[in-house]
Amino acid sequence: AHSYTKYNTWDTVQSWIASISSSNPNLISKQVIGSTYEGRPMTVLKLGKKSSSTKPAIFMDCGIHAREWISPAFCQWFVKEALSTYGSDSQMTSLLNQMDVFVLPVFNIDGYDYTHKSNRMWRKTRSRKSGSSCIGADPNRNWNAGWCTTGASSNPCSDTFCGYSPESEIEVKNVADFIRRNKSVLKAYLTIHSYSQLLLFPYSYTFELAAHHSELLKVAEGASAALRSLYGTSYTSGPGAATIYPAAGGSDDWAYDLGVKYSYTFELRDTGRYGFLLPESQIKPTCEETMLAVKYIAAYVQKNL
Ligand code: 0X9
Ligand code: ZN
Ligand code: ZN
């Protein structure tokens, strides 16, 4: 059965997607944006009060990397909190009245399923190509942003394999198409990973600073302070290349270069004690503190529409 304080399997997340959207039709709708390599449906949830005019929006994805289980847990938590605090929390109410939030609960579904069934430490997609016996590409090295120029491998057996071409991974193509289609309304792109407790923004494919570097840093520092206020969890903010490592082909850099200014990668808890194997007892505190950071960014974006 589904639980917000457990790591749910894909089958459980899939039934949760169906039930949560049908039980809250006034605030949530769903749309399938394509299928994964193995044929699973990629469903984006749209949160927001219905409006006659087009609303500006935020896009958030979780689970680009299969083994980062706290990430899909956060997207599920976010959807629950949005629905349960709309009407009582003034910020959430105002956010969903004025904007839509698109949530992709699990990006790399095939990989996520594989981590539950076969290999807990799998990171990549599960695509195959004749000529190599190695499976999958890194869905955060496969975007058309300095593709495969640094911090990525052209070896199909590597965990950071950039793929055979930009958007060769169908999951990346599906999300990139969705973002391109909705480009005019999208004001922010948030992508949730683990671990290291970082709040990163462009660029990772170059050490050059983004055109909006100071503003992106200021917002990241505000969001980190909000996050820390709950349990004292400390985050470091900065551009990806200098803060974690140079790595091209990431979704954050791609979305930013497309024109989505507020583009952030979260690396959630912890700093390495448990790493990807974060205990379920930490799901609730991690999600509660991360809500504060996401809401901080959303409030800033909303104020600056
Ligand atoms: O390497 C990554 O893709 C991310 N770290 S993780 O440990 N979750 O794999 C960091 C991504 C930072 N952004 C880019 N490299 N574009
Ligand atoms: Zn990751
Ligand atoms: Zn709560």
Image (tube, rainbow, N blue to C red):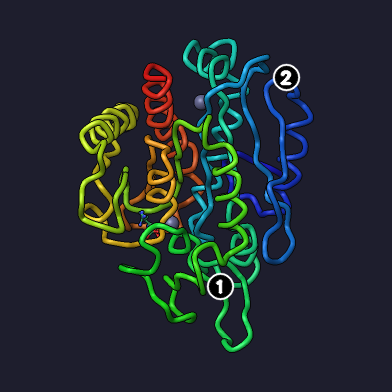
Q: Tell me which amino acid carries mark 1.
A: Gly
- Front-lying residue, 181 or 226: 181
Res. 121 in view: no
Compared to 198, does 170 lie above or below? below
Determine the secondary structure under disc 1.
Answer: loop
- Front-lying residue, 196 or 281: 196
| Total marks placed | 2
Q: Which residue is mark 1?
A: 136
Residue 294 in the image: state x and y as whole percent. Answer: 42, 31
Determine the secondary structure under disc 2.
Answer: loop
Label disc, if present, on residue 26 of the rendered structure? 2
- Image quarter where the N terminus lies is top right
- Front-lying residue, 197 or 128: 128
Residue 43 in the image: state x and y as whole percent. Answer: 68, 45
202 vs 252, left or right, is left
Residue 96 in the image: state x and y as whole percent. Answer: 56, 19
Image quarter for residue 213?
Answer: top left
Quarter for ligand 2? Answer: bottom left
Q: Dot 2, how many residues are within 10 Å of its Cα: few (below 14), some (14-19), or many (20+)?
A: few
Residue under the image location 77 percent in, 35 percent down: 19
- Image quarter where the C terminus lies is top left
Residue 130 in the image: state x and y as whole percent. Answer: 63, 85
Q: Earlier in the sequence, mark 2 or mark 1?
A: 2
Measure the alpha-carbon separation of dots 2 and 1.
Answer: 38 Å
Res. 205 in view: yes
Residue under the image location 53 percent in, 47 percent down: 62
- Asked whether mark 1 lies closer than 8 Å to ligand 1, one says no
- Asked whether mark 2 lies closer than 8 Å to ligand 3, one says no
Residue under the image location 43 percent in, 36 percent down: 285
154 vs 33, left or right, is left
